[in-house]
Every structure is written in structure tokens, then in C-alpha cells.
Amino acid sequence: MAVTPAAENSNIWLLFACSQSRFTASLMNNVRFPYVAGATAQLILRAKDFPMISVKAESVQEKQLTIDAATSRHLMPLFLGSENMVVSFNDTGDVARDYTFSLQPNGLALASIVRDCWTDDETP
């Protein structure tokens, strides 16, 4: 598991986890989101030198928005190759929420995830 806090709010984290070769990425709140995100949320991921990406995330209780494992796995090169990432979504009141995460240096933090979640031919 690896986490990085949002620049705007130290209670918001971008979490990467790998279990039995299943990789997931989630937006987490230490306590709970102070607003309702809904059962699903459309997340917009923006990083320098990559196109803007829109993905669906499922709400888990009141403190986690998780991108499904298959999509998370396809996004791993984005997470590995970006210096920063902005994750945006609208809450159910249609208020835009933007969170900026530092993704570098990530060699040590993500080394075990890359090792445990990829075979040699899949490693980015």
C-alpha cells in the first residue's frame, strides 16, 4: 500500500493498494467526506504530459471513492510517470472538488506494488 496526501486538505489521500495481484486506486478521507459523493462519482484525473482522463469510482462507506481494479491497473503508467496529479469530481450538490497529489519520488513507495502486481511483460 502507498498513500499521498492532498495539498489542499491533509485528511484527503490518494491510496494505491495491491493484494493478490489486484491493484486498486482510491480517494480516501481519514474520517469521512464532509459532503455526499453519491454511490458513484465521475473522477477527472489530470497530469502534465498526459491527456485528461475520466473514470468512474464507487463510493465505499462515507470515506472512500475507489476506481475498479481493471481501470486502476490500466492507469498505473499514469501514476508512475506523473510528478503531480489533480483529481476532480462534483459532489451531489454539483460543487466541484479538486485535490492535488504529489506522485514523486515514488520508486520506494510503489516498488512493492509494481513487483507484486505485474509480471515481467506487464511492468511499465
Image: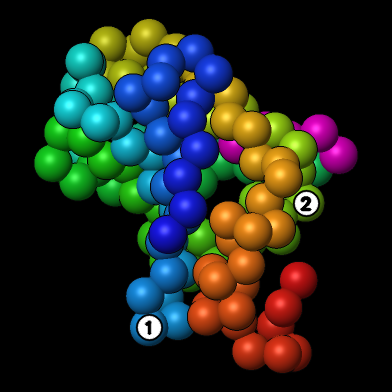
Q: Which mark is residue 90?
A: none
Residue 45's place in the image compared with 118, above or below, is above
Magenta span of residues: 45-49
In the rendered structure, are the residues bearing label 1 and label 2 in contact, judged by CB atoms less than 8 Å apart? no
Image quarter where the N terminus lies is: bottom left
Q: First in sequence, mark 1 or 2: give its number.
A: 1
SS type, badge 1: loop
User: Which secondary structure class fits the magenta region best?
Assistant: loop
- Could you tell me which residue is drawn at 67 percent across and 51 percent down? 106
Q: What crowding class fits label 1: few (fewer than 14 Cα within 10 Å), some (14-19), or many (20 or more)?
A: few
Query: What residue occupies the far left of the structure in this picture?
Result: 61
Query: What residue occupies the far front of the structure in this picture?
Result: 108
Q: Which mark is residue 20?
A: 1
Image quarter where the C terminus lies is: bottom right
**Residue that carries the numbered disc 2 in the rendered image:** 81
Q: Position of residue 119 (x, y in %)?
A: 64, 89
Please give left or right for residue 71 compared with residue 18 in the image.
right
Residue 98's place in the image compared with 107, above or below, is above
Q: Position of residue 16 (x, y in %)?
A: 46, 55
- Could you tell me which residue is drawn at 50 percent across and 38 percent down? 4
